[in-house]
């Protein structure tokens, strides 16, 4: 990218973090003179999207011209031949059937029209050769060996010109020469021309130095790294660096676009086929109605490139600083600009480090523990951006008492924001962790319409044991991971990130501290209270986490269930007695039937009969007791259901 020597030199450069740079050029043009800007072909899409022109001096811009770029395949498709990679001469000439050609074989000259070209394959008697078949002026057709020809010339001047243009197109496709934009304007006097545009550029980079001094506030020094890859020197340009990432994209504006159009024909241009018409079955009178045609017009919105109005003569504010070249910062909407107060010079194809910040900063030293696989925390610093400027993200080299202490990486930090950075391992502090958990503990019980809802919690405790072996006090930040569905129960974090709680622990010199972090996960369960066994209800009644009123109501339910369970026991025992009596009676009846067939057993039969009568009386008594127990159970169940319906807590 560049301009003609003295026409429009670069005056201002603004570099962004999303791969583009803003350039402003200006210069004096004589009356009737046009300006020319040169760009790389890869830059033309962005130039055509962003270029704006301002003329001062009474003239008007009459037009812009630039070198067009048609796709190579499109250019080559217009020629009646194609030159492929490794293509033989005979194959090239075979595409030119009918063209006049002249061949020289020593002193003999042959002229004729090309009939065909071919390659004769190799055999045992002769090697591979290229042959050309010509139709001579005499009407004779002769075959010639192209390898024997000392000179070959096309006699058609148009075809010669096409070959030259074809080769020039190939050379142009490989060329990385500049593409020129010409600015034409009207006017009869000298005038000043200003051109603004955006082109692809390397992003600028930030590098910081954090300097700790025991007797003063920490100093943060910022350096910007810029790369001049334009192939043109930036001499005394006004340089600005913008932090932030606006949306930017490439739109294919430079290469001509072609679309495939449909083929349309008028009906009269097609041959008419015979049509067989069917006879009518019914006839009806149809009133003809005139058709009304309505034209629709679509308004196409016109787009124009966004103009960035810049005043080249605008004064730049200077700020006081102890560094050679200082940069003033200011908000640009959602972006932030560092503007160097003195002109900057960067040679072509060179890079430069430019100091843009040197300022006291609010900071404090900390230790931070965030890696459970390590027993040592990290030396860290808590930086509060009190500079009033946005600090672009980048690496930070830390110095303590004029000695190298480590390195860190910082994200972009807005004014007033705070960030932790870690730059080394603190070998004077060790941490171990111990994990403990408890089973489900019922915390809450609710009853409504016979449905019991319980909330229980699984409690887990992670205890950090911290040993400070150094004889100096320290402040430790513990990063404890945030786990879904778990909540802290005792400790309150100093701050919370998206993935971790941060706890601040003060460590005295040479001490061991324990720091437990307890979390719980709450589960909710619902079930019908009528289906709960007395043993399960007893666990709720004995739970001290429940209120006395809740436990008293649950005790009433438990008492009724126990009474019902006792009556159920009586009923089961009575049923067992009845089954046993039935079995005895069946045995006695079988014995009586057997003895009745034996003479002299009347007395034993009478004894068995008396036993049967006694058991019948016993069965009647048991049935009465079973009926009474069933009535008691029904009454107790009714009382329990009524109690459950009325209970709510």
Image (spheres, helix red, strand yellow):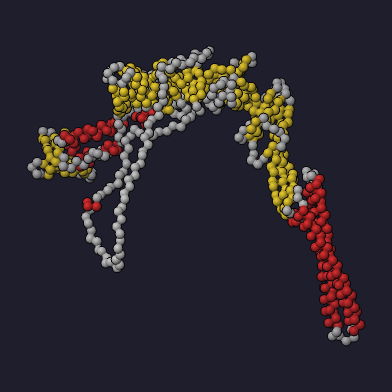
To which quarter of the image does residue 118 belong?
top left
Q: In the rendered image of this protein, does residue 346 appear above or below residue 146?
A: above
Give how far across and how far down residue 239 sits, in percent: 44, 19
Give whichever of 119, 371 is nearer the camera: 371
Q: Residue at x 37, y 36 (%)?
A: 301
Give how far across and how far down residue 295 sits, in percent: 32, 45
Give how far across and how far down residue 290 sits, in percent: 30, 53
- Residue 32 lies left or right of residue 398; in this view the side is left
Give whichever of 300, 524 is nearer the camera: 300
Q: Does residue 55 show up?
A: yes
Q: In the rendered image of this protein, does residue 384 appear above or below residue 320?
A: below
Q: Residue at x 22, y 35 (%)?
A: 163
To which quarter of the image does residue 584 belong?
bottom right
Q: Locate the N terminus and report the quarter of the image it occupies.
A: top left
Give how far across and how far down residue 130 sits, in percent: 20, 41
Q: Does residue 422 show up?
A: no
Q: How many marks?
A: 0
Q: In the rendered image of this protein, does residue 306 appear above or below residue 524?
A: above
- Residue 244 lies left or right of residue 381; in this view the side is left
To which quarter of the image does residue 467 belong?
top right
Q: Residue at x 62, y 17 (%)?
A: 217
Q: In the rendered image of this protein, does residue 326 appear above or below residue 440?
A: above
Question: Extreme bottom residue here?
Answer: 599
Q: Residue at x 31, y 50 (%)?
A: 292
């Amino acid at each position: 990218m560049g301009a003609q020597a003295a026409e429009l030199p670069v005056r201002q450069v603004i570099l962004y973090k999303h791969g583009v740079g803003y350039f402003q050029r200006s210069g004096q043009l004589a009356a009737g003179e046009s300006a020319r800007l040169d760009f790389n072909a890869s830059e033309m899409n962005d130039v055509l999207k962003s270029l704006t022109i301002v003329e001062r001096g009474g003239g008007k811009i009459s037009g812009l011209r630039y070198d067009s770029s048609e796709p190579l395949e499109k250019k080559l498709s217009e020629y009646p031949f194609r030159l492929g990679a490794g293509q033989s001469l005979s194959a090239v000439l075979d595409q030119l059937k009918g063209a006049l050609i002249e061949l020289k074989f020593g002193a003999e000259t042959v002229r004729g029209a090309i009939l065909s070209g071919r390659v004769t394959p190799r055999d045992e008697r002769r090697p591979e050769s290229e042959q050309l078949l010509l139709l001579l002026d005499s009407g004779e057709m002769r075959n010639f060996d192209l390898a024997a020809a000392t000179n070959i010339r096309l006699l058609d001047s148009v075809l010669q010109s096409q070959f030259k243009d074809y080769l020039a197109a190939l050379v142009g496709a490989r060329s990385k020469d500049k593409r020129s934009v010409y600015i034409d304007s009207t006017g009869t006097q000298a005038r000043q021309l200003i051109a603004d545009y955006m082109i692809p550029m390397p992003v600028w980079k930030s590098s910081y130095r954090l300097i700790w001094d025991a007797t003063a506030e920490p100093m943060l020094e910022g350096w910007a790294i810029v790369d001049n890859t334009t192939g043109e020197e930036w001499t005394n340009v006004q340089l600005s660096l913008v932090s932030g990432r606006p949306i930017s994209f490439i739109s294919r504006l430079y290469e001509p676009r072609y679309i495939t159009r449909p083929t349309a024909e008028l009906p009269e241009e097609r041959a008419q086929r015979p049509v067989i018409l069917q006879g009518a079955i019914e006839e009806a009178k149809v009133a003809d109605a005139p058709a009304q045609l309505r034209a629709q017009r679509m308004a196409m919105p016109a787009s124009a490139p966004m103009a960035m109005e810049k005043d080249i003569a605008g004064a730049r504010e200077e700020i006081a600083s102890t560094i050679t070249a200082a940069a003033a910062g200011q908000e640009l909407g959602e972006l932030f600009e560092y503007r160097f107060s003195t002109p900057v010079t960067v040679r072509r194809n060179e890079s430069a480090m430019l100091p843009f910040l040197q300022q006291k900063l609010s900071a404090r030293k900390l230790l931070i523990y965030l890696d459970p696989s390590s027993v040592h925390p990290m030396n860290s610093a808590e930086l509060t951006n009190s500079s009033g400027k946005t600090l672009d993200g980048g690496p930070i080299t830390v110095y303590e008492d004029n000695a190298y202490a480590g390195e860190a990486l910082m994200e972009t930090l807005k004014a007033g924001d705070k960030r932790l950075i870690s730059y080394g391992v603190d070998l004077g502090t060790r941490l171990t962790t111990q994990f403990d958990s408890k089973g489900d503990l019922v915390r809450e019980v609710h009853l409504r319409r016979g449905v019991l809802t319980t909330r229980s919690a699984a409690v887990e405790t992670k205890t950090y044991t911290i040993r400070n072996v150094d004889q100096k006090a320290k402040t430790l930040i513990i990063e404890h991971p945030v786990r879904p569905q778990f909540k802290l129960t005792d400790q309150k974090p100093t701050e919370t990130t998206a993935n971790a709680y941060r706890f601040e622990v003060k460590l005295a010199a040479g001490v061991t501290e324990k720091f437990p972090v307890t979390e719980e996960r709450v589960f909710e369960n619902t079930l019908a209270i009528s289906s709960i066994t007395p043993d399960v209800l007893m666990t709720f009644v004995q739970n001290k986490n429940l209120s006395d009123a809740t436990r008293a109501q649950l005790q009433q339910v438990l008492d009724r269930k126990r009474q019902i369970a006792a009556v159920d026991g009586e009923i089961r025992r009575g049923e067992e007695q009845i089954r046993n009596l039935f079995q005895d009676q069946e045995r006695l009846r079988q014995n009586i039937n057997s003895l009745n067939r034996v003479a002299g057993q009347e007395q034993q039969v009478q004894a068995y009969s008396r036993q049967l009568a006694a058991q019948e009386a016993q069965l009647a008594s048991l049935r009465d007791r079973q009926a009474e127990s069933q009535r008691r159970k029904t009454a107790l169940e009714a009382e329990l259901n009524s109690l459950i319906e009325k209970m709510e807590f």
